[in-house]
Image (tube, rainbow, N blue to C red):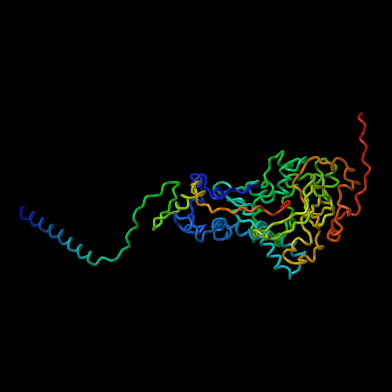
């Protein structure tokens, strides 16, 4: 996404519309600090460009329920990064990794304003619509501004020859139609406030990864008969509980290898270099089996991790690199009703091409991927012959 | 009757004068009472102007931020460096 011009980022394009909003009833300085002056430099002294960096004293004054939950939001705390970095590294390497993280990853940290007022700072920022607060974030200027290269391209059908996700193509569904505010804003600090029953007392810990805890959103929320086999589709009756929906209904998606990061000697700016990116569809064993996700097989995506990704910041910063797979549990956002692998039983059974067998994994990553590599491809099955027409 | 009427008129006059005297006396012992707030007109719907004592107001912010040309004129020059990143982010 092209960055906005500097003036464009801060222009209140429709002052009358802005003045009519409830947020315009607040004094500018209440949220932004600075001081009243016709002189730009004076006015901007101690000004806070994004007041929602400290939401308790700004947004939280009127939206305390949302702000009190947001420390547990993965968009805010970026805990998912630290879950995998912590697992692969060792405590003595954390200072170097924290420096790396600050330079290359922290810009993905999201504030209230990054979704409801401006484009995310990671893509240059700037008002979505002249400082008008947006109840629903823009799909393309907020969500896929950050989640573009994988989710956005898949969902919107930007890969040549691959259709957009059916939920977008046929349903024109926006990201927030599935990923609702409750998911984005984080888990409330006191679950018992809304769930007072004794069985709810053991609240799950805050999510430390996007696939932690409840499977939400879940396909079956809108398609409840699929996993119970009550829709008359034989494959749902047979595999509804042991395969993730994407096994049959997803198609080729992006995979990336090795994202090396460094600081430019000429500009001092951080930069990255991804080795390769390729489309592919690979079924692996489920590396995160749980009550919520009991599947035997799931699509797996190669993420751009390599043992030497962060060597600019120190040697061997990921000494436990093999403790997590490089092919990870994936939920590609390119759902189709009809896919090649769902054409028949043996489009999948016995079809080695679909499965992440050892020959598709780099030898240097075999150890890391023991939990996902498929050793034995499901055998072909005797398919029913079509009954002759009477 | 004329005498009685004149006497009554005189008495009434004295009473009025006495009243004035008491009033004058009270005013000399008046206690401090907070002045009532001056009546200000209700702001018109949609108006949120807040005038500050030094003459500046939030309009200072808006005056600039609704003026595209002024924002262009006062924008800091942006140093554009070609990105050294390569591959998909």
Q: Nearer the viewer, residue B3 or B12?
A: B12
- Identify the residue at horizontal 69%, vertical 47% (top origin): A178
Asked if A238 appears above or below B22 in the picture, the reply is above
User: Quadrant location of residue A208?
Assistant: bottom right
Quadrant, the C terminus of chain A = top right
In x, y percent, where is residue A83?
73, 62
- Identify the residue at horizontal 55%, vertical 53% (top origin): B77
- Identify the residue at horizontal 5%, vertical 53% (top origin): B2
- Identify the residue at horizontal 58%, vertical 50% (top origin): A126
| Residue lying furthest bottom | A92
In x, y percent, where is residue A121?
62, 54
In x, y percent, where is residue A37?
44, 56
Q: Nearer the viewer, residue A378 or A332?
A: A332
- Relative to residue A261, is residue A46 drawn left or right? left
The answer to whether residue B2 is seen in the rendering is yes
Q: Nearer the viewer, residue A272 or A137?
A: A272
In x, y percent, where is residue B55?
39, 55
User: Quadrant location of residue A187?
Assistant: bottom right
The answer to whether residue A198 is seen in the rendering is no
């Amino acid at each position: 996404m092209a960055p906005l011009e500097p003036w464009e980022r801060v222009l209140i394009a429709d002052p009358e519309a802005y003045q009519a909003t409830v947020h315009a009833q607040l004094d500018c300085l209440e949220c932004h600090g600075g001081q009243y002056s016709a002189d730009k430099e004076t006015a901007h002294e101690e000004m806070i460009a994004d007041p929602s960096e400290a939401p308790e004293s700004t947004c939280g004054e009127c939206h305390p329920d949302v702000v009190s939950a947001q420390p547990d939001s993965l968009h805010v705390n970026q805990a998912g990064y630290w879950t995998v970095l912590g697992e692969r590294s060792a405590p003595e390497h954390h200072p170097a990794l924290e420096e790396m993280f600050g330079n290359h990853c922290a810009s993905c940290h999201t504030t209230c304003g990054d979704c409801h007022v401006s484009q995310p700072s990671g893509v240059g920022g700037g008002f979505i619509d002249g400082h008008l607060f947006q109840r629903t974030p823009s799909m393309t200027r907020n969500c896929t501004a950050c989640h573009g290269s994988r989710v956005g391209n898949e969902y919107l059908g930007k890969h040549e020859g691959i259709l957009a996700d059916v939920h977008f193509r046929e349903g024109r569904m926006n990201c927030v139609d599935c990923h609702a505010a409750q998911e984005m804003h984080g888990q409330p600090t006191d679950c018992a406030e809304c769930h007072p029953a004794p069985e709810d007392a053991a609240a799950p810990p805050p999510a430390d990864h996007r696939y932690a805890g409840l499977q939400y959103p879940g396909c079956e929320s809108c398609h409840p008969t699929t996993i119970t086999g009550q829709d008359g589709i034989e494959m749902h009756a047979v595999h509804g509980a042991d395969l993730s929906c994407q096994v049959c209904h997803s198609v080729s998606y992006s995979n990336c290898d090795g994202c090396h990061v460094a600081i430019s000697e000429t500009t001092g700016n951080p930069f990255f270099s991804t080795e390769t990116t390729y489309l592919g569809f690979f079924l692996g064993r489920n590396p995160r089996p749980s009550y919520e996700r009991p599947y035997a097989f799931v699509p797996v995506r190669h993420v751009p991790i390599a043992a030497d990704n962060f060597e600019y910041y120190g040697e061997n910063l990921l000494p436990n690199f093999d403790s997590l797979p490089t092919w990870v549990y994936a939920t590609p956002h390119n759902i189709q009703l009809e896919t090649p692998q769902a054409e028949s039983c043996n489009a999948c059974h016995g079809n080695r091409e679909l499965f992440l067998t050892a020959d598709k994994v780099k030898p240097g990553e075999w150890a890391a991927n023991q939990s996902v590599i498929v050793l034995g491809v499901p055998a072909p099955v005797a398919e029913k012959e079509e009954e002759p027409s009477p | 009757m004329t005498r009685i009427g004149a006497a009554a008129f005189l008495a009434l006059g004295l009473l009025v004068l006495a009243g004035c005297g008491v009033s004058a006396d009270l005013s000399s012992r008046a206690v401090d009472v907070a002045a009532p707030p001056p009546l200000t007109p209700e702001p018109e719907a949609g108006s949120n102007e807040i005038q500050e004592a030094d003459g500046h107001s939030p309009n200072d912010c808006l005056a600039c931020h609704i003026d595209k040309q002024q924002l262009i004129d006062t924008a800091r020059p942006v140093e554009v460096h070609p990105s050294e990143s390569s591959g998909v982010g």
